[in-house]
Structures are given as C-alpha cells and as structure tokens.
Image (tube, rainbow, N blue to C red):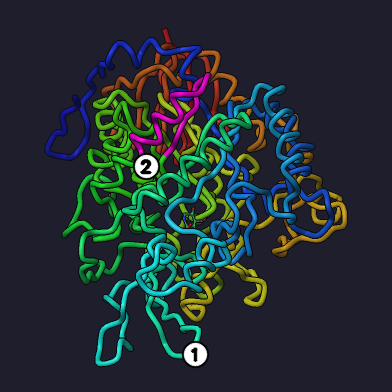
Amino acid sequence: MTQENSAGSVTPASREYPAEVATASGSEWWRSAVIYQIYPRSFADDSGDGIGDLPGITRRLPALAQLGVDAIWLSPFYTSPQRDAGYDVADYCDVDPLFGTLEDFAALENEAHSLGLKVIIDIVPNHSSSDHVWFQEALASPAGSAERCRYIFRDGTGASGELPPNNWESVFGGPAWTRTTDSDGTPGQWYLHIFDSTQPDLDWQNPWVREQFKDILRFWLDRGVDGFRVDVAHGMIKAEGLPDYTPPADSGSMGGGTVGLEPEIGDHTDGPTPPYWAQEGVHEIYRDWRKVLDGYEGDRVMVAEAWVEPLTKLANWVRPDEMHQAFNFSYLETSWAGPAVRRVIDTSLDAFTGVGAPSTWVLSNHDVVRHASRLALTAENPQGHGVGPASPGQPNPQLGLRRARAATALMLALPGSAYLYQGEELGLPEVIDLPDESREDPTWFRTNGERYGRDGCRVPIPWESDAASYGFSASGASWLPQPSDWAPLARDAQVGVSGSTLELYRSALAIRADHNLGLGDVQWLPGYGDSVVAFRNGDVTVIANTGDVAVELPVGDVLLTSAEIHEAALAPDCTVWLRTS
Ligand code: NOJ
C-alpha cells in the first residue's frame, strides 16, 4: 500500500480497510480500546504487606477511569508460590491470599464495570506451577501413567538417562529439563520447563489438558470477565519428537529480539522455527477456545502474548475464528527512527487488516525495559535481559522521557487498540540501581546475575509524593525498593499540572476518543524528511520528529504536543497533533 523510494522513505498512500473493520463501533469494543495493564503486586497495597493486592486495585480504579482507558488487564493473581511473580499458577480458579479472595475479585470487577472499564485477566496455559496438584500427582505416579501424561516427561539420554532428553535451554537461562527422583530415591525421568524449573510445561497434545482449560475459561467467564490475555500463546505445542535446537544469539528472552536500537525486528525471520514456538498445532486450541467465548453474551475477547515474527505470521493468531488481538511486539521492538517506525506501522496495518483484525500497539509491559529508559539506551539490550548498574549503554533519563512522551503520543494516534503498562502514564523510568539482594526475577538467579532481568520495570508505582512508599502501601512497605527521587513523578504531583506526563496521557486519550482515532486510518503525508513520521488520521494531523533538527510545522490548531513548541517548529523527539483544514 505504500511504496519506498531508494532512500528508504515512504511515499504517501491512502489505506483501505475492509468495511466491517472501518464501521465497527459500539460493539466489538476491543477494536479501538486502550487497555491498561495492572501488575497487581506493584499497583496498590491495602493489606500493608508491601505487595499490591486486589482491594488496593479496587480502591484506585477511579484514577484509571479518570485517565480515560477502556479496559484493564490484570497480570496473574491466582494461587501461586510466586516463583515467577504469579506466572506459576498452582490453582487457576482461586485467588492467592497475597492478593485477596474470590470475593475481592468480584468486588474489583463490579467496581470496574460500574466505572465503565472492561476486565481482562491473564491465563497461563503453557505451564503450571510445580506446586499444582496436577504436577504433584504426576510426580507421585509412575512413568507412562495418565498423571504423567499431563506434562512432558521423558527418559533421559546417555548410558543411564543422566543427560537431558534434548538440548533445549530455558528462556530464563540454564537447561529446560529437570530430572525427577523416584519414590525409592533413584534418579527418574526428566520433565520439560521452557521457563523456570518450577513451571513444568503441560502437554497440550493430551485431550485431558484441553478439557481442564476450557473449564477454567468457563469458570472466569461465568464470573463476568470480559476476556483473557493468553500467556505464551505461541508455545503450547512442541514439534514432534522434540528435536534439538540452538537459538540464534540475539533471540531474546521470550523469543523476541533486541530492543532499543536500530535492528528492525518484525519484518523478517532468520532460520528455522524453534521447535517450541509458533507450531501450527496451537491454532486448533484457539479455535476451540473461541467457540467457548462465543457461547457467552457480550464481546468476550482473547489477546495473544505471542512473540512471533514476521507480523504476517503473527496475524494467523487473529484470524476470524481465533483470537481477537495479538500484542504487537514488533512495534515495541522498533527503534525510535522514522523509517523503522513508518515501516512497522505499515506492516502491522497490512498484516492485521489482512485478516480483519485491529492492529495493536504497545511500548511497555512487565517483561521489557520501560520505554522511558529503553528509547535512550545506547547499546544493544536483548529483551528480558534488563538494565542494571553494570549494563552497557546506560540511558540518559531526560532524553528517555522526552522520547517516551513523543513515542506515546505517536502510538495513541494510531488506529487499532493500544496497551499501556502501569506507571508509564507517570513517565516512570526503569529502576536501574536495584540492590542485588532485592531482585526476584528468576532470570537473575538462573543466569547467576549475568542478566538483570525484569525487576526494574516492576517497582511499585508512586501515588502520593509525600507519603511513605509514595502511597503504594499504607504501611510504607514495598516488595522492591522505590527510588528516592520519585516524588515529582507521583500521581498527585502530576494531576492537573499542565505539561505533566499524566496530563499528556489524559489529553491524548480524550482527544483519541473524541476524534475516533482508534477506528480511523493512516494516510502518510508527503514533504517531510526521513526522520519525520507524518500522517493524517481523520481530521487529525500527527507529526513526530525522531531526528535531531527541528521541523517546520504546517498551519493548524495544536491539539496535543509532547513537548513545548516554539515558533511553529517541532523540536527533535517531539510529537504534535494538529487540526488542519
Ligand atoms: C510471559 C509473561 O509475561 C512473563 O512475565 C512470564 O515470565 C512468562 N510468560 C512465563 O509465564
């Protein structure tokens, strides 16, 4: 739909959407929704134990309604030993006492719905916790038993089974297999865990597993949830025979690539598909799940957490009878550079529109370096590795925040659905100098501190500038230490303050809604240099300057600007929305 000239710049072209996409409004709320990710342990703590909880979330929900988002997505709050911050589920149908009770969840959901917010919850089907009764029963049962067949147990290789069944590595570092001990104390079979050893992979070839999860979906749908974010939605089926595989050096933690710098991810794939990611068999599972969701009233949705490239392949997750949305990690991984940004927008819109799905857009989540730091990194940083005191390419905080504001203003002008991660509306940076002893990410432990992991983006968020733990917890406790200089970033220090990051987000969301940008389109504008991203969406002209020289602005009313504008010139790392005639 667009053409590139030899210099790599994009010439303008109008984009056409299938009629059913362009006209969807009211129903199918998810097509244009802005969805706010709540990471429960770091959002708000009512119990005073330093870990956020459901009542804390409920109490703070009005702030999100005021912000102007359409829905919340809650990361896991289920019963869990918390070896991977709740992505290790020991009971899919209950709330961990750390976070509250099922009644607390019902109260949260009621409050959200009464504020007009939809509620999406996380479902973790690739693996359970090793504490789950299914796995405990499997361990206690003999090789080949029905209980063992719930998971991926195999005999070892080597003379006496002392070597793992294949060479797969855990996403968090170290081997992806752990050997069990039989009841008589002798070494037994091995089980697969693509993540931590406390997260055994379920065997999705087993119909019993499939039935369990459909029941789990129904359990929560019956309780009124509006949808599911599906964890590792590209990993549930493994290639027949579990063949050996060695990933390329820069393939990143979740299967993603290198974030923050020039390499453009999302438009190419190198090498064979890993035998544990993006296998064709996963699609049958989602078709089955879609039928379950479609049996319920209202628009219940599924969004795939699938680190799959290229985007044309990821689009298979959102074909009309599969999921509704998939996270656009190619967008997240795009560098702050005009040609790369234009290309990923075009590729995304083409790929998703091609299957009748909305594109999604995301810049931050609980697994990646916050974009207020990431966009100013000056060295490669594979996804999931995190940034710590000894990391190369330390970001300049002022530049990072300036770029983050510009990048967000650009993202929120795009048609489709956008995901925000708690705290980005406050301009929070990655916390780089966490003390080693406070770190909890299994990545840190499984790599012996070689990778800092994801704790730096999970620090509890600041609500009140002059309260202990910045109002996160009534007791002043915080499971990860908060930086001492966060008072100006606290919500109460930004509310109503013109030019604050919070007010920038609030205005952007209000204008996005007023001008129906989520259901609009992208028409590239001619006449700008390579480092400028300029397009019209409906009656709004959006211009983002990723370069290092100011750009002259056209005549028009300024609706939104990510930084101050002087003399009709758009400074570097700034995005403006104009109403032009
Ligand atoms: C993706 C989740 O976002 C991440 O936090 C988790 O560690 C892995 N999946 C394993 O569940």
SS state under label 1: loop
Q: Which residue is mark 1?
A: 185
Which numbered disc, 1 or 2, marks the residue that appears first in the sequence?
Answer: 1
**Residue located 61% across and 69% down the image:** 440
State how many labels appear.
2
Image coords of residue 196 (percent x, y): 48, 69
Where is 190 relative to 462, above or below?
Answer: below
Is residue 552 visible in the rendered structure shown here? yes
Question: Residue pushed farthest top?
Answer: 581
**Residue located 31% across and 78% down the image:** 155
Report the span colored magenta: 286-303
The verdict on residue 292 being magenta is yes
Q: Nearer the viewer, residue 136 or 59?
A: 136
Distance in Å between CA atoms under marks 1 and 2: 50 Å
**Res 331 label:** 2
SS state under label 2: helix
